[in-house]
Amino acid sequence: MSLFICFVIYVCVCVGAGKKSWPELVGKNGEDAAAKIEQENHGVRAIVLLEGSATTRDRRCDRVWVWINERGVVTRVPRVG
């Protein structure tokens, strides 16, 4: 189980088991990237979103946004939070 810890200066980090960032997935297919993220960190759900889509502003240790372009290619480094 991951925890979300915030410090007084409002820097929040997720602590716990599992990989937290996937820079190697930029440029890959979004659906394939989401599957790989969930395989490498069983504590998160990867959500594929088109660039420019509205999202919530909350930070969560069980979620990874996978941002894609109109061709379905990952455009940002997916990160827990």
Image (tube, helix red, strand yellow):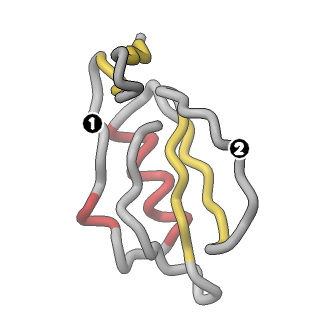
Say if 73 sits above or below 11 in the image: below
Q: Residues within 10 Å of mark 2 (few under 14, many from 20)?
A: few
Q: Position of residue 8 (x, y in %)?
A: 36, 15
**Residue 33 occupies which quadrant of the picture?**
bottom left
- The amino acid marked with disc number 2 is Thr
Residue occupying the point 26% across, 61% down: 23
Q: Quadrant of the N terminus?
A: top left
Q: Is residue 33 above or below residue 40?
A: below
What's the mark number on residue 56? 2
Sequence-first tag of 2 and 1: 1
Q: Residue furthest front?
A: 9
Q: Is 64 situated left or right of 9 in this image?
A: right
Query: Is residue 2 visible to us here?
Result: no
Q: Which residue is mark 1?
A: 19
Image location of residue 9, percent across then percent down? 35, 24
| Front one among 43 and 6 | 6
Tell me the element at label 2: loop
Image point 50% across, 54% down: which residue?
Answer: 34
> So how many labels did they put on this image?
2
Q: Residue furthest bottom?
A: 71
Q: CA distance from mark 2 to mark 1?
A: 22 Å
Say what amino acid the circle numbered 1 marks. Answer: Lys
Label 1: element kind: loop
Q: Nearer the viewer, residue 17 or 56?
A: 56
Q: State which mark lies toward you, 2 or 1.
A: 2
Q: Is 41 situated left or right of 34 in this image?
A: left
